[in-house]
Every structure is written in structure tokens, then in C-alpha cells.
Amino acid sequence: MRSPWVIIGVIMGALFLIFMVVLFAVGLRGEGTGITGKSVGLVEVLGMISDARTTVREIRYFVKESNVPVILLHVDSPGGVVTPSQEIYSELKRAKAKGKKLVVSMGTLAASGGYYISAPADVIVANPGTTTGSIGVKLELPNIEGLLKKLGVSVDVVKSADYKDIGSPYRPMLPEEKDLLKGTILDVYDQFVTVVAEDRKLPKDSVLKLADGRIFTGRQAKACGLVDTLGTLNDAVAIAGGLAGLGPEPRIARPPKPFRLRDFVMEDVVNRFLMPRLSYAAW
């Protein structure tokens, strides 16, 4: 008679094999050979913008599809890190340069970086109560000096020049360091303002009056030219269909979603909370 542990081992091995087969099948899901029939390509940006790779891949997928003349970008995001926001923005600009139309549908929240990536759209659709705007840049630098003192921990730093450890979490920031960082922030802020002015075809002086970090409702944003029209996601679909000559109820195509284990792993706590990052984030 076989040992119960042998039986359990065989069962566990079989379950593992089934699990791996399922993962492989999911990983291949949607790879296909292309989209049949004219469609509107839907790309969703939901939550904090901390990594542009998935969104960029989805935009490029639709750019290669001749049956997708319009990309519908659904944004429900408070913004996020500067560089990923700029990467998504740049990819959308390339898509337009290659002949794709772009419609943005703003959900509950499309602020700061969420607005940045919306700016190049041919048509921006916001709900009347959408929270948008928050045009500005911030740099968050944690300071854990007090905590380390309570723990009896000190940190010695050897540096090549005075500002090499600027923004260190182990000591207070000096006034001259704040001035240096303010210059960096203002440069990125000017990039943001310039994008809005150019893509929305607004005078830069007018944008500067709006770009003090304040938020707007969708209705307020429409009144000052930051969005084009008020409506729901369904309204944005109808607008996209009209731009593509597909009528108000076009077929919606979604990009393939290959399985990736890292999508199920929590973002590294140290990277999220302790690393200094310039951000287009509302809060």
C-alpha cells in the first residue's frame, strides 16, 4: 500500500501541471493575427500612472492595426510619475502622426498626469462631475531622521560634492537645496504648461492662469477650454465612431492581455514610499 504522502505528492504535482497549462493558455489569449472589421480601439488608463509599458504596448498594437482608425483613451486616474506620463503622451502623439484619431473619455478622475495624457486628443469628453485639471508638478521627499533617532540609528554619508545627497531622507533639506530642486520642478512644470497650450490651442498666458494646481469639474473645464464636450463613456464611443465613419455604435476592439506574473505582485514598498519621484499627481 502506497504511503499517503506519495499520493498527496502525486496529486499536488498534477495540480501544478494543470495550473501551468492554464497559465500558458492565458498568456496566449488574444494574441491572434489582427482585428477583423473596422473598430474603435479602446485603451484604458486606470489608477496611478507609475509604469507606461502596458499602455504604450496597447497604443502600439492599435497603431499597427489598419482596421482601427480611432483610439479611444478612457482615463480614470489622479496622475502619477512624470516620466511614464510623458511616455504615454509621446506614444499618443506618434499614433496621431501616423493617422490615428484620438478621443479621450474622462471618468471620475482625470487630473494632473491624467490630464497630461489627455491633452493631445482630437476630442476630450468629460462628465460634468469629472475631477480634472490639477496642472502642476510636485516632488515628495520623505524625511525619516526623527524615526531613526528614536531607534538609535545614524547614517554616515561620504559624497563627492555638496549636492550629491540632495533630498536625503536622513537629514533636513537645506534652503539652497530647496532652491535647486525648485528650479527642476519649474522646468518640468513649464513642459506641462507648454503641452497644454500647444495641444489645446490656448495662449500660454491663459494656461498659466489655470495651472496653479487647482482642480476643475468637467463643466468648469469645458468653460475654460480644457475639455471639448460633456458626456459619458458611451457618448465618447459615439464620437469616436463618428470620426471613424462607423456610426454612433461602433465595434469596440480591446488589446490582447497577455498574462504576466508581475501584474499580481504588489509594487515594492520601498520604491513606492521612500524613493523621491517627480509626479503629476493630484494628491
Image: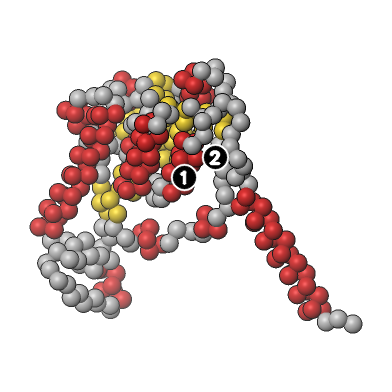
| Residue name at image x 17 percent, y 53 percent | 181
Q: Is residue 139 left or right of residue 241?
A: left
Q: Quadrant of residue 250?
A: top right
Q: How dense is the environment of label 1, judged by Cα within 10 Å: few (below 14), some, or many (20 and up)?
A: some
Q: Is residue 140 left or right of residue 174?
A: right
The N terminus - image quarter = bottom right
Q: Is residue 164 left or right of residue 140?
A: left
The C terminus - image quarter = top left
| Residue name at image x 25 percent, y 51 percent | 139
Q: Nearer the viewer, residue 68 or 210?
A: 68
**Residue under pointer 2:** 255
Residue 220 at least partly seen: no
| Residue name at image x 42 percent, y 21 percent | 230
Q: Secondary structure at mark 2?
A: loop
Q: Quadrant of residue 225?
A: top left
| Callouts 1 and 2 close, C-beta under 8 Å | yes
**Location of residue 238 in the rendering, given as x and y in whole percent from the top left corner:** 51, 20
Q: Nearer the viewer, residue 154 or 89?
A: 89
**Residue under pointer 1:** 57
Q: Quadrant of residue 226?
A: top left
Q: How dense is the environment of label 2, judged by Cα within 10 Å: few (below 14), some, or many (20 and up)?
A: some
Residue 187 at least partly seen: yes
| Residue type at numbered disc 2 | Pro
| Residue name at image x 14 percent, y 71 percent | 160
| Residue type at numbered disc 1 | Arg
